[in-house]
Image (cartoon, rainbow, N blue to C red):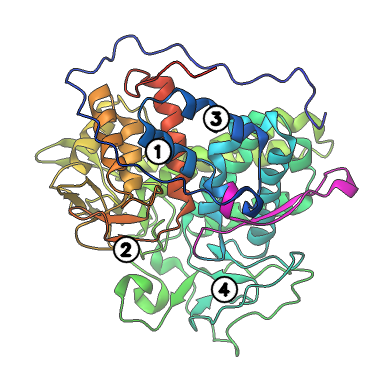
Amino acid sequence: MYPPDETTTQPILPPPCQDCPLSKPRPPRIPLHLPNARPMVAKRKFTSDAIEQVVQRVTAVMADRDLAALFRNCYPNTLDTTVAWFHDDHANDYKRPRSFIVTGDIPAMWIRDSTEQLLPYLSFAPLDYNLQNLILGAIKVQATYLAYNPYANAFRMPPDGPKPIHRQTHGDRVVPPYDPSLVWEAKYELDSLAAFFKLSTEYVRITKDSIRLIEDQEWLQAVHRVLDLIEEQMRGTWEEPRRPKEKEPHYALVNTTSLKGVPLGEGYRFLRTTDIPTETLGQDGLGGVVKRCGLVKSAFRPSDDATTMPFLIPANAMISVALQDLAMLFEQVSYKDPLAVLPILAERCRSLGLTIREAIFRHGVVQHPKYGQVFAYEVDGFGGQMLMDDANIPSLLSLPLLGFISKRDPLYLNTRKYVLSDDNPWFFRGSQIEGVGGPHVGRDMVWPMSAMVRARTATTADEVLDALEMLKRTTAGTGLMHESVNKNNATEFTRSWFSWANGLFGETILEVLEEWPEVIETIQPAD
């Protein structure tokens, strides 16, 4: 029944951790006097009473006022600044809400980013029907995009939105061709598809609102198209069709009011004229050469950089979990399906998910001379492996957050030691912060996101505290998180407005308060 009835209560927090005290003195607290960086109330794009109450409750009990200021600024940042369009479909009994969520300083909607931007609010969606519709609206717009072109990673305002986003295209040569009036960029990233499934399944799990999803034919069409793509991308490189004759123009100029989907079946190619190697693919747009082995290719990483070996292990881990969660969803709602389509979909998802998971452990685990068995970052199915990690989620460091493996599993612990060491070519250690970066921003640049993942995968209170202290030092006085910061100089950073990192910081604080309550000093709130 919608909206939720009055008996809906707030989530019950787990009991405090009793066996994880700090083992070293807390560092002296030097006030940073971080500012209030939220927009004025009248200029906020979307306001949720439930989220505002969370902000007030949490900040009121935090003794560290700089940490409180960061939470106040960061946690609601997606709602404050990136909801470019929201239509609640009130006139149609809220059946088809629509939401367009930009990344921040880039006015386009990434499938992965929009999922990660909204997930921190999902636990509170049953308390705020408007927030719930905002999240459902984003899922439905994601479905519109992926039903049209599941190979694209970022999109412009949908045709039913208020206004188009104009942008000069890169002149990319892409198979399958697409309409540039809808697609912002067509870099095929496996984790984007996993993100769509993840937001959908988590939405139903928490809100219990399955009807408005499974009865949406466009959403089901998107699911089918994504599954077709996954099976297509399990092929080895030399199984791919030879390059088709290029159409003039190479974009499929379709009628975007009907959004006829781009053709699948001819594989994926991407070529861009650039002097940055990670912005295009080799082998005439096919990318790195791989052999079929049960894994799924990903042409690009979550950083939007090209993969070296297209079997990207973190993305495969994420899609394997997402597929099994989707199978469970279809099984749970199959009684509402008189045509018995959902049980077939459930079996297809489960079989794919298990095949990928088994292939990860068969081909993605390597013996390191120093750390023992660890997960590789990328493999090629021929026996080649790339050992590294990138800060962007999904990453090897984030595998427990994806639900793929326990953070106390020995294989993960070995991998984590490697990732957070100088043996990882993209781990940097400086006077301001230490953590993981990546090729996207280069030498000496650490992504604060990696410190947040470090805090959430830590097994000691001391490491959690160290991560939070580093994060406080890296805002350059802005009171907000950035994409990356120089390891020695926080004033050298990229992207002053990066909503995903802000939301992840807020989510990290909430999780630390639950799992490591002794790490964040609390006070009795004023009456």
Which residue was labeled with disc 3? Answer: 56
Mark-to-mark CA distance, 2 and 1: 30 Å
Q: Dot 2: few (<14), some (14–19), or many (≥20) neighbours within 10 Å?
A: some
Q: Position of residue 274 (x, y in %)?
A: 36, 81
Mark-to-mark CA distance, 1 and 4: 30 Å
Q: Earlier in the sequence, mark 2 or mark 1?
A: 1
Q: Dot 4: few (<14), some (14–19), or many (≥20) neighbours within 10 Å?
A: many
**SS class of the residue under badge 4?**
loop
Quadrant into which the N terminus falls: top right
Quadrant into which the C terminus falls: top right
Q: Earlier in the sequence, mark 1 or mark 3?
A: 3
- In the picture shown, does residue 330 fall above or below 243? above
Which residue was labeled with disc 2? Answer: 440
Which residue was labeled with disc 4? Answer: 176
Mark 4 is on which residue type? Answer: Pro
Mark-to-mark CA distance, 3 and 2: 36 Å
Q: Nearer the viewer, mark 4 or mark 3?
A: 3
Query: Residue 310, located in which quarter of the rendered image?
Result: bottom left
Judging depth in this view, the residue of 135 and 64 nearest the camera is 64
**SS class of the residue under badge 2?**
loop
